[in-house]
Image (cartoon, grey):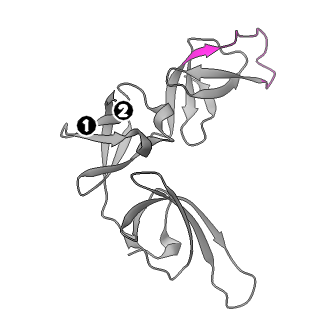
């Protein structure tokens, strides 16, 4: 059972019979003497994605969840269900689109490098790689000589994701996108 001051981003804990993943942690140290440090934690329920905020002191105990991490790849989408395959034993797991809400724009056919978070052999959530490479399918024409200017333009990927890219990029080019911030990183 971890204390609140031992929580890490991405960790899954059990609160009131539901599983929650830690999304953000803020620590506040009150200035008065003898006051305890407070930890304001934002959780997302897994599966489901419902947000939950709570504040803890460093001595508050939380129930840790026995979780396994396995490498998976995206196989296919059928209706609102997304199917992933374990790369070690080839077993398949499915998740509803609502559980992947924030991650859907980054998931592509045959995508690898995804980590599945399993509790009792059921898929609760996914961890995407730090960055993904995607092809620009729609953007305004490139402007010659605009490499020195820091101006950007919108570009759309095949998954529907829109990213601000430098003006010199053209349709059909592959770019690297940060999955946490959703921002352009570089050409691929």
- In the picture as drawn, the residue positioned furthest to the right comes out as 149
| Category of crowding for the residue at label 2, using alpha-carbon neighbours closer than 10 angstroms: few (below 14), some (14–19), many (at least 20) | some
- 111 relative to 24, above or below: above
Q: Are marks 2 and 1 in contact (CB under 8 Å)?
A: yes
Judged from the image, the secondary structure of the residue bearing numbered disc 2 is: loop
User: Mark 1 = which residue?
Assistant: 87
Q: CA distance from mark 2 to mark 1?
A: 9 Å
Count of numbered tags:
2
Q: Residue at left 40%, top 66%?
A: 13
Residue at the image position 38 percent from the left and 75 percent from the top? 1
Point out residue 21 in the picture as x, y percentages from the top left corner. Answer: 45, 58
The residue stretch that appears in magenta: 136-151
- Residue 137 forms part of the magenta stretch: yes
Where in the figure is residue 28, as x and y percent of width and height?
67, 73
Verify whether residue 83 appears in magenta.
no
Q: Circle 2 sits on which residue? A: 112
Label 1 element class: loop
Residue with the most extreme front position: 79
Q: Is residue 113 left or right of residue 149?
A: left
> Which dot marks residue 36?
none
- Quarter of the view holding residue 80: top left
Mark 2 and mark 1 lie on one chain; the one further toward the N terminus is 1
Please provide percent x and percent y for residue 113: 38, 36
Seen in the picture, residue 166 relative to 7 is either above or below; the reply is above
Q: Main secondary structure of the magenta part?
A: loop
- On the picture, is 159 further left or further right than 125? right
- Residue at the location (70% across, 9% down)? 141
Q: Residue at x 49, y 62 (%)?
A: 8
């Amino acid at each position: 059972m971890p204390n609140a001051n031992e929580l890490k981003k991405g960790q899954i804990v059990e609160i009131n019979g539901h599983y929650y993943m830690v999304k953000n942690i803020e620590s506040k140290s009150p200035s008065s003497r003898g006051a305890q440090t407070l930890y304001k934690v934002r959780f997302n329920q897994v599966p489901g994605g419902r947000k939950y905020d709570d504040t803890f002191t460093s001595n508050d105990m939380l129930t840790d969840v026995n979780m396994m991490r396995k490498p998976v790849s995206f196989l296919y989408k059928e209706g609102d269900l997304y199917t992933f395959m374990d790369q070690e034993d080839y077993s398949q797991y499915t998740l509803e689109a609502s559980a992947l809400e924030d991650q859907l724009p980054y998931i592509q056919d045959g995508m690898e490098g995804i980590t599945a978070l399993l509790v009792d052999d059921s898929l609760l959530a996914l961890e995407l790689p730090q960055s993904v490479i995607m092809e620009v399918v729609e953007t305004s024409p490139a402007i010659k000589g605009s490499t020195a200017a820091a101006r950007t333009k919108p570009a759309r990927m095949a998954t529907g994701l829109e990213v601000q890219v430098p003006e010199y990029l053209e349709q059909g080019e592959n770019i690297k996108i940060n999955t946490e911030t959703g921002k352009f990183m570089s050409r691929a």
